[in-house]
Image: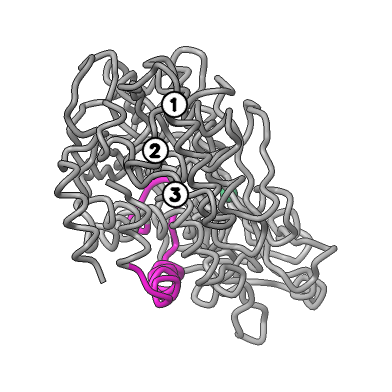
Amino acid sequence: MSLLKDFDQKHSAALGHELHRFARELYPICRSITGDGLRRTLAMIQDRIPVQLAELPTGTPVFDWTVPKEWNIHDAFIKPADGRRVADFQKSNLHVLNYSIPVHAKMLLHELKPHLFTIPEKPDWIPYRTSYYKEDWGFCLSHNQMLALEEGQYEVCIDSTLAPGHLTYGECYLPGRRTDEVLISCHACHPSLANDNLSGLTVATHLAQFLSGQDLHYSYRFLFIPGTIGAIAWLARNQSNAQRVRHGLVLTCIGDAGRFHYKKSRRGNAEIDRAVFDVLNHHTELPEFLEFSPYGYDERQYCSPGFNLPVGCLMRSVWGSFPEYHTSADNLDFIQPARLAESLRVCVAIFDVLENNRCYRNLNPYCEPQLGKRGLYRPTGGEAIRAELNARLWVLNLSDGEHTLLDIAERSLLPFSAIRDAADLLFQSGLVAVFSGEDKDTKTSPHSTSAAAIGAARRSRP
Ligand SMILES: [Zn+2]
């Protein structure tokens, strides 16, 4: 089974627009680490894929943390004497310091100013600021808006609630043939921010949609969670199951025009790290690989020493490194349909590697088998054929039960997809058999579908 080939056959150029449309639907919602904005977001994901919701009451201990009070907001504004609304929550939910406690008061400008946040270097952008764990209130506005505020009295209103409630997260589980899992995690706690938040949510949702129609080797678990506290809460509730996670990816900032970046898992050379390395190097332009560091997104929690799960973080532009990060400029124009679609395809290609990474055994290990009499040796077929032949020879040579297809791809410097195609062909020709710790010497197909069925399916495709 090739996930990637199936993906390429099913999806057209319209896919990116579909992803972007979903981001546009989610964009106006005021999300936070708790509250109805997060619930509404999860409900919209539930319209597309089966998501189980978890609700943890305020005060629940989760490792060294405690589930905070629930925050909800209805309105907020600053009103000068002339009655117009400045920093109007109805125009942008970024105007409110996320998690602001309620306030309704009159005050002078100098009293208000300590509660205002701006970015002087980007005077037209609104910053995104939070105060989850310290009770505070504030407004974020463009620097130019602040400069226009005159001395005088202001009505200041934040119509919010911060009260005992719940922390919500969503989980979509797609069972495969094994209980070993691939974890895909993305944060769903930022308000109107597109790349940092919505790009991961939309790509993960579509990825789950695509995978749910597949016959999968691994089980897949998608987490749509508030950053940090959500990952900690999930790990606290799943401490004993977490070791089922064999591979994992945090998806974030994958809709912008930047090249791909991959932050390795704490292990540094896990199969997921190697699979991503293969796909980004062979399928994308100038990817960059970052060593693990204990700062970033929720890989921090998955890679904490008690868990040390093989979870890396896939991004385009790296958080904090692009000027639009955590500002109103990280908007729907900053993410592009084609980039979202390419990111989705890259994820499928990564899982295609994981799903198909097997060991084979050469059934003719004494010298090379004669490929010509099987129609597998075409020395005059040009460059592409030479590459295919090269892949076949590599697979035959290293199929000793010791090397996986990914090992062979790394050693031959050929893409995993080429090595996998060669292994499929050699398997169908009876030259190699699947070899694994669990089912030694088996001659069954590496995939659940038989080789004949694969052939028939390929022929029937347009
Ligand atoms: Zn962020």
Q: Quadrant of the C terminus?
A: bottom left
Q: Earlier along the polypeptide chain: callout 1 or callout 3?
A: 3
Q: Which residues are magenta?
A: 11-37
Q: What amino acid is labelled 2 in the image?
A: Leu
- One can see residue 155 in this view: yes
Which of these two is toward me, 11 or 454?
454
For disc 3, the marked residue is 347
* Tag 2 and tag 1, C-beta contact below 8 Å: yes
Residue 14 is one of the magenta-drawn residues: yes
Query: Could you say where residue 430 lies in the image, as x and y percent from the top left?
Result: 25, 33
Q: What amino acid is labelled 1 in the image?
A: Glu
Query: Could you say where residue 166 lies in the image, as x and y percent from the top left?
Result: 30, 41
Q: Quadrant of residue 360?
A: top left
Q: How is the image coloured?
A: one colour
For the residue labelled by badge 3, is the local secondary structure a helix, a strand or a loop? helix
For disc 1, the marked residue is 368
- One can see residue 167 in this view: no
Q: Tell me the residue at 38%/31% (across/down).
A: 357
Task: Please tell me the numbered disc located at residue 376.
Answer: none
Tell me how far mark 1 sits from mark 3, CA to CA.
36 Å
Q: What amino acid is labelled 3 in the image?
A: Cys
For the residue labelled by badge 1, is the local secondary structure a helix, a strand or a loop? loop
Which of these two is toward me, 239 or 71?
239
For the residue labelled by badge 2, is the local secondary structure a helix, a strand or a loop? loop
For disc 2, the marked residue is 371
Label 1: few (<14), some (14–19) or many (≥20) C-alpha neighbours in 10 Å = few
Tell me how far mark 2 sits from mark 1, CA to CA.
8 Å
Query: Could you say where residue 193 lies in the image, as x and y percent from the top left?
Result: 55, 62
